[in-house]
Image (cartoon, rainbow, N blue to C red):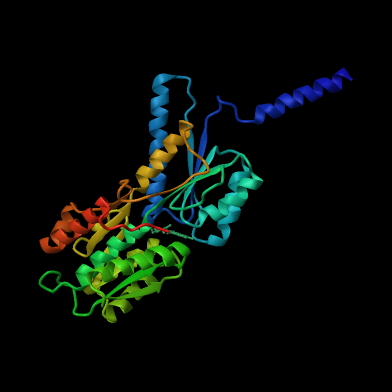
Amino acid sequence: NSFLCATVIISLFAFIGCEKTDTSPKKIAVFVPGNLAGSPVYEMLAAGATEAVTDYNAAMESKNNSFSPVEITVIEAGTNQAEWSNKLTALCATSEYDVIISSNPSLPDLAAPLTEQFPSQKFILLDGYYPNNSNITTVRYNQREQGFLAGYVAGLVTTASVDEMKYANKELKVALLAAQEYPVMNEIILPSFIEGAKYVNKDIQVEFRVVGNWYDAIKGADLARSLYNSGVDVILPICGGASQGVFAAAKELGFYITWFDDNGFGKAPGYVVSSAGMKQKQMAYEQTYAFLENKTEFGTARTVGIADGYVEFILDDPILLETVPATLLNQMNDIYKAIQSGKIVLNVE
Ligand code: RBF
């Protein structure tokens, strides 16, 4: 009997030993729903989280030389979206990661059911929105501001004269080329792009085309060419790696690009007329660092925008200054200030 009792106690200790203790190193997984290459949102996510871990480790090691450094693993889930849920489930099932960090508006709906199956698994989801789940925190960007700014510049450029913008034609046509349709695209980004363009001139026509995936640059180029042939002179590509084809077509044919998510001026100098971005690297850094300091408020869903400094509109890039004349640049500055100061209010929901 006492033997049995001892075995039970030993196995109990062995079981407890498997649980994470405060001395075992923390582990973070960055789950990239797609590929890193060609997708600034994901590159910024991975870079910010990795940098936060490096800085946190350095800070802790300088205070305590027996500190076990935090480990971070970046996992690319690939472009087959049908596999994401299984891949995310497998990641949770390892129980290895104190937190899974990811980004895009479809992630909360994949993660939420997993918080029931794996009640100790935490998630930090950027570019997504999901309130009231105590295992999940989300931060999304005000993409109405972002889309409006892209549309506004597209409107300025398509209404410009050839003296101002050499590739601008007489037709008032601009386009958004998306990789796929999804609620944030259909309900926020596209409507606000249209809103921004029509703010310049109500007669501007906005075309919408869909590539069908986030990687096909050949198809991206084909769609851009046919848009150009139909009179479009400004395109906003939101299609990940497929945007490479849009840049190539712009250089080949001569039309303009309004860029989204990060600074795009260097991607095709002379063709990119604006960059309406999100400070995703900074956000990933801050959220990761806060998690390591046990400061994450799970259960919250935040929206951040221009006034908070997380939606940016780059107005001082030297390539931009060479691409657009002062008249347009002044209008870009004015609209940005109007949004920043609250004179123009662009709320989501
Ligand atoms: N953005 C990318 O840059 N690359 C991607 O591979 C990518 N995949 C996405 C998949 C889904 C299901 C959804 C809803 C969005 C995806 N996004 C992707 C878009 C991204 O979250 C964001 O909406 C755009 O980058 C515009 O800011």
In the rendered structure, the answer to whether residue 104 lies left or right of residue 157 reads: right
Residue 121 pos. (x, y %): 59, 41
Residue 202 drawn above or below residue 85: below
116 or 210, nearer to the observer: 116
**One can see residue 50 in this view:** no
Residue drawn 13% across the image and 74% down it: 162
Q: Quadrant of ligand 1?
A: bottom left
In the rendered structure, the answer to whether residue 250 lies left or right of residue 223 reads: left
Which quadrant: the C terminus?
bottom left
In the rendered image, which quarter is residue 2 located in? Answer: top right
Residue 41 pos. (x, y %): 39, 53
**One can see residue 344 in this view:** yes
Residue drawn 15% across the image and 69% down it: 165
In the rendered image, which quarter is residue 230 located in? Answer: bottom left
Residue 317 pos. (x, y %): 19, 52
Residue reaching furthest to the bottom: 230
